[in-house]
Image: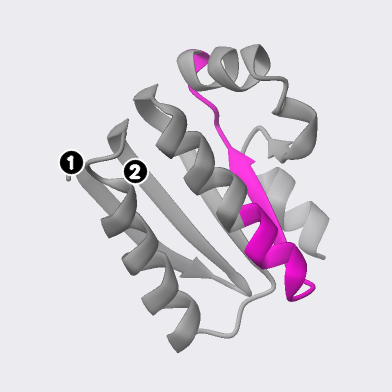
Amino acid sequence: MEKLTVSREKNALYFKYDGEITLDVTPELKRHLEAELADNEVAAVVLDLSGVGFMDSSGIGFLVSVNTRMRSIGKACYLCRLSPKVRKTLGLVQLLSYFQVVENEEDVAALLS
């Protein structure tokens, strides 16, 4: 796995991943996310995808599963700082409107206040 940074700001859990989101790394990303959610009461998960240069179908599935899980427990999931390639990929599979996409952390803070 490339580089994963996890932080918490107020009531949001921030995940920033730099690298490719593929079948090779999605299980580990899921494990990290589940561990963090088990240990933290949060109102939202923010996935910063600015450092993601490529994402395959398992990466798309990971994003969908995080979004679905958070919605099922009445919480929010935001995709933040989409790289051009991620934005293009999600657009091609017509999923951009499925996610709550924000440009930066300030937008997240405004939505959570």
The image quadrant that residue 88 belongs to is top right
Residue at mark 1 to residue at mark 2: CA–CA distance? 8 Å
Residue 52 appears in the rendering: yes
34 lies above or below 61: below
110 lies above or below 103: below
Sequence-earlier tag: 1 or 2: 1
Q: Locate residue 82, reporting x and y percent.
A: 54, 27
Which residue type does callout 2 highlight? Tyr
Question: How many numbered dots are placed on residues in this image?
Answer: 2
| Quadrant in the picture for the C terminus | bottom right
Left or right, residue 74 beside residue 3 = right
Q: Secondary structure at mark 1?
A: loop
| Quadrant in the picture for the N terminus | top left
Q: Say whether residue 26 is magenta.
A: no
Whether tag 1 and tag 2 are in contact, CB under 8 A, the answer is yes
Name the residue tied to disc 2: 17
Q: Locate residue 55, reporting x and y percent.
A: 40, 26
Task: Determine the residue positioned at 37% across, 28% down.
Answer: 52
Segment colored magenta: 67-84
Residue at the extreme left: 1
Q: Locate residue 80, reporting x and y percent.
A: 58, 39
Task: Determine the residue positioned at 63% across, 74% down.
Answer: 11
Q: Say whether residue 74 is magenta.
A: yes
Residue 2's disc is 1
